[in-house]
């Protein structure tokens, strides 16, 4: 990824953030909620957005789930007339997991649930057997990479202020 252009924040005014990539014109985005919003409001809004997706939480055995939490958007073979989009987070609170690991991993997977429930292109997945459209492997890989980046950004916005405040 060393050849990719990196965005740089050039100014912040209220909830307007201006960013620029090397050799490109600057552009502005609106931070929603505004950057001045306190952390508790951000967390409450994120939790409400996640709840609105209808995500389900299912306890999983460590033998099935190798990480503290895993997001599974689709099932391979739904029943007749059933949807393939399942929107489930499997989590493992086994003896070798700390509560912090499970909480952070669940929050990361909630970011995926939030993105996938709103992103139509994610449903053009090779794993969604009900979709009449499937992205080419290159585009699917890019979508997954961007989904992971967006979720990591959510994690940074959620975890870093907590770590900074101690």
Image (cartoon, helix red, strand yellow):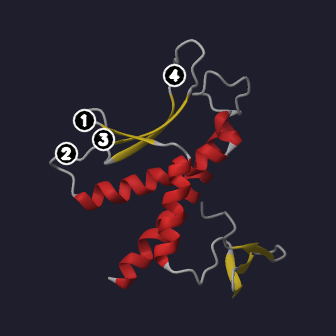
Query: Can the viewer see residue 156?
Result: no
Query: Can the viewer see residue 141?
Result: yes
* Residue labelled with disc 1: 61
Mark 1 or mark 2: name the one nearer the start of the chain. 1
Asked whether disc 1 touches disc 2, contact meaning CB atoms under 8 Å apart, the reply is yes
Q: Is residue 9 left or right of residue 85?
A: right
Q: 4 or 45, which lies in front?
A: 45
> Which label lies toward us, 2 or 3?
2
Residue 72 to residue 45: above or below: above
* Residue 113 point in image, percent of width and height: 52, 47
Mark 1 and mark 2: Cα distance apart in space: 8 Å
Mark 2 or mark 4: name the one nearer the start of the chain. 4
Q: Count neighbours of disc 4 (C-alpha within 10 A) and say few if under 14, some if 14 to 19, many if 20 or more.
A: few
Mark 1 and mark 3: Cα distance apart in space: 9 Å
* Residue labelled with disc 4: 76
Label of residue 94 in the image: 2
Mark 4 or mark 3: name the one nearer the start of the chain. 3
* Residue labelled with disc 3: 66
Residue 146 to residue 8: above or below: above
Mark 2 or mark 3: name the one nearer the start of the chain. 3
> Which label lies toward us, 1 or 3?
1
Q: Quadrant of residue 122?
A: top right
* Residue 143 point in image, percent of width and height: 65, 46
Q: 12 or 56, which lies in front?
A: 56
């Amino acid at each position: 990824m060393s050849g990719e252009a990196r965005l740089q924040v050039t100014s912040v005014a209220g909830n307007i953030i201006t960013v620029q990539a090397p050799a490109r014109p600057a552009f502005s985005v609106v931070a929603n909620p505004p950057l001045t919003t306190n952390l508790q409001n951000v967390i409450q809004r994120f939790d409400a957005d996640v709840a609105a997706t209808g995500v389900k939480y299912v306890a999983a055995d460590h033998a099935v789930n190798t990480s503290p939490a895993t997001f599974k958007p689709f099932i391979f073979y739904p029943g007749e007339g059933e949807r393939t989009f399942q929107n489930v987070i499997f989590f493992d609170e086994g003896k070798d997991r700390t509560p912090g690991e499970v909480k952070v991993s669940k929050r990361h997977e909630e970011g995926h649930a939030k993105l996938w429930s709103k992103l139509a292109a994610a449903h053009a997945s090779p794993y969604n057997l009900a979709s009449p459209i499937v992205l080419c492997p290159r585009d699917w890989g890019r979508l997954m990479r961007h989904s992971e980046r967006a979720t990591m950004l959510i994690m940074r916005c959620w975890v870093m202020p907590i770590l900074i405040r101690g």
